[in-house]
């Protein structure tokens, strides 16, 4: 950031008085420009024994598989964002959305939130951000071609939890997950 979005004057990187971290501060109007994490909302769309995945048509990770997910928009709930992203990327409607996983990714200033959702039918289509959309059984998941660690961890948890028929809500740091293997209780 170089200029204040309030008055157009240059900003400086400094720790404001009574604050504990540096922020962009306008040199003229003294507006403090806070930068906060972004929320990525996604879904594990389930049809019978299968999960719907999308092959990405955009960067980052073009050509790799992921769960439908994207940035939350102003004016919507996390659940609405997850349903919208599933419709936009996979052409699929989801029902019975249940909060499932929250991942803190402080190194990229994001929080990823995943819901479990049921597909009311096997209707889906390639969206503008997808090259391909496909239902996968657990044994057919392209594990070596998954786009993001959060996709991998969400799918690993989902298939582990499905065996138990118990889907606890989890909140974990992706840094903690990379150093700790998933435990099967």
Image (spheres, helix red, strand yellow):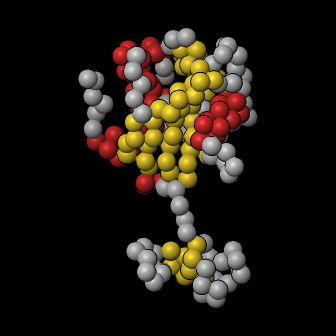
Q: Quadrant of the N terminus?
A: bottom right
Residue 107, image x and y in percent?
43, 55
For the point 59% across and 41% down, the residue is 78
On screen, residue 154 versus residue 80, left or right, reads: left
For the point 43% across and 77% down, the residue is 19
Residue projecting furthest to the bottom: 28
Residue 57 appears in view: no
For the point 56% across and 31% down, the residue is 43
Examine the rendered structure and indicate whether residue 119 appears above or below residue 21: above
On screen, residue 46 versus residue 105, left or right, reads: right
In depth, the one of 57 and 85 nearer the eye is: 85
Residue 55, image x and y in percent?
61, 29
Residue 163, image x and y in percent?
38, 14
Residue 26 appears in view: yes
Quadrant of the rendered image containing residue 64: top right
Quadrant of the rendered image containing residue 57: top right
Residue 112, image x and y in percent?
50, 43
Q: How many marks?
A: 0
On screen, residue 112 versus residue 56, left or right, reads: left
Examine the rendered structure and indicate whether residue 52 appears above or below residue 76: above
Examine the rendered structure and indicate whether residue 52 appears above or below residue 10: above
Q: Quadrant of the C terminus?
A: top left
């Amino acid at each position: 950031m170089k200029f204040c979005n309030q008055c157009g004057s240059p900003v400086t990187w400094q720790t404001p008085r009574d604050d504990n971290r540096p922020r962009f501060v306008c040199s003229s109007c003294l507006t403090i420009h806070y930068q906060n994490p972004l929320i990525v909302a996604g879904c594990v769309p389930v049809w019978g024994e299968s999960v719907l995945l999308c092959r990405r048509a955009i960067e980052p990770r073009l050509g790799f598989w992921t769960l439908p997910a994207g940035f939350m928009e102003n004016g919507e709930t996390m659940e609405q964002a997850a349903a919208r992203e599933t419709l936009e990327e996979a052409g699929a409607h989801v029902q019975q959305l249940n909060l499932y996983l929250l991942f803190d990714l402080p190194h990229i200033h994001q929080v990823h939130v995943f819901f479990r959702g049921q597909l009311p039918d096997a209707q889906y289509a390639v969206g503008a951000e997808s090259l391909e959309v496909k239902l996968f059984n657990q044994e057919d998941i392209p594990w070596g071609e998954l786009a993001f660690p959060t996709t991998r961890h969400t799918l690993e948890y989902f298939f582990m939890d499905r065996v138990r028929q118990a889907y606890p809500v989890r909140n974990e740091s992706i840094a903690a997950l990379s150093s700790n293997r998933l435990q099967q209780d």
